[in-house]
Each structure stands twice: as structure tokens, then as C-alpha cells.
Image (cartoon, rainbow, N blue to C red):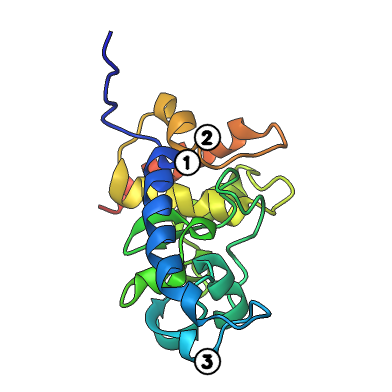
Amino acid sequence: MPDEVSPHPSRRVVVGGGLAVGAAVAAGSYLSATSAEGAPAAEAMRQVSLTVNGGRLKLAVDPRASLLDTLRDEVGVTGPKKGCNQGACGACTVLLDGQRVLSCLTFAVLHDGQEVTTVEGIGDGDRLHPVQQAFMDHDAFQCGFCTSGQIMSAVALLESEEPGITEDRIPEAMSGNLCRCAAYCNIRDAITSASATMAKGR
């Protein structure tokens, strides 16, 4: 029986394929320009222009640096969290040109000219994004460590992927974000509520 192709491939499938290609491209040009100690030689650094939460930045990055490490260590945003650092937990989820990505599984050097949005960039001044407000209203935080990634996945889901998502689709759509605190029902309730709020604003 032939395998069926899902109309909604999981993020793990998409990211897994992209990672293999990205790693080969970045590593190939880098290996010849590292020092004996493994530190990047000056000529090995790459200039990258990123727009992060609306601010345009020019950075000299190590081609081996993940987008997550670049955001946290070079840009100074701490919303994306380093959880498993293997693409399994989703704590590092950000939006890249409006699409959710696991920032630990991609290299910053591959995203020259692109726009990155982290949880710090989705609100409007003191006004929270509807998803942030819904997470508060429905006590969907748990310990809070993975919450920023959960929120960013939900924002992408409701703004660009499935604006009118049904409640029964939410667990699968959010399956790339793992929570070990058994509170998925609160997250599902929060996303359902945010979907209704955002629909009223359209």
C-alpha cells in the first residue's frame, strides 16, 4: 500500500529535510577557514542582515551558529529558549518571514535578509497579542520555560496557517511543541479562545 501524503506535513518532517541541506551548505564552506583550536577565523565569519522584531541588524556570525544562539547571544533576545537543542521540544520556535521555524535547527547564516519575530515582538506596546492574553486567561503557562515557543507556534497557526482551526486539529498542529507538565488542555483552550478573538478582528 503506497504511503499517503498528508496535506499538513508535520514540522519535524519539513525541518528535518531542510536541516540536512542547510548543514551541508554551511559546513562545506566553513571547514577550510577554522583555526586549529576550532574557533572561527576572522575570515570565516559571515555578514548577515536580519530584521529582528522590526529592527534591522547587521551581524558578523559564525557559520556554525544556529539562529537560536545568534538571537540569544548576539542579538540579546531571550524569548526563544534552548530546551532540547535537537528540534524536539519547540521551546525555540520563532517566526521567520511569518512562518514558524525551530531556531535551534537552522543556521543564522542561511537567513540573510529575512525577518525574524520572537515572542518579544508580537505585542503592541503594553497591549498583548491575543494569543498571549489567552494563555494568561486560561492559565496555559505551566512552568513557563516552553511557553514562548508554544505562543509563537500558536500565533503562526492562527495568523497564517489555519486561522479558523478547529479544536480537534489543535493537538496535531501543536505537536512540535512538547510540554511535560500535562497541561495541554489549557493550551488548547487558550488557542481556541484566541482564534475566536482574532476572528472578530478580521
Which x, y percent locates residue 198? 35, 50
With respect to residue 187, does 38 lie above or below?
below
Residue type of the residue flagged with mark 1: Ile
User: Are the residues flagged by discs 3 and 2 in contact, CB closer than 8 Å?
Assistant: no
Query: Which residue is nearer to you in this view: 84 or 185?
Result: 84
What whole-number distance in Å separates the C-alpha atoms at marks 3 and 1? 46 Å
The residue where tag 3 is placed is 42
With respect to residue 100, does 196 lie above or below?
above
Query: Tag 2, which secondary structure?
Result: helix
What whole-number distance in Å separates the C-alpha atoms at marks 2 and 1? 5 Å
Q: Residues within 10 Å of mark 3 (few under 14, many from 20)?
A: few
Quarter residue 40 falls in: bottom right
Which x, y percent locates residue 56? 38, 85
User: Are the residues flagged by discs 2 and 1 in contact, CB closer than 8 Å?
Assistant: yes
Return the mark for residue 191: 1
How many tags in the picture?
Answer: 3
The residue where tag 2 is placed is 188
91 relative position to 194: left or right: right
Residue at (52%, 79%) from the top-left corner?
62
Residue type of the residue flagged with mark 2: Arg
**Residue 45 shows in the view:** no
Which x, y percent locates residue 180? 70, 37
What whole-number distance in Å separates the C-alpha atoms at marks 3 and 2? 47 Å
Query: Which residue is nearer to you in this view: 150 or 125?
Result: 150
With respect to residue 63, does 105 lie above or below?
above
- Ranked by sequence position, the earlier of labels 3 and 1 is 3
Return the mark for residue 165: none
Residue type of the residue flagged with mark 3: Ala
- Ranked by sequence position, the earlier of labels 3 and 2 is 3
Query: Tag 1, which secondary structure?
Result: helix
**Residue 68 shows in the view:** yes
Q: Residues within 10 Å of mark 1 (few under 14, many from 20)?
A: many
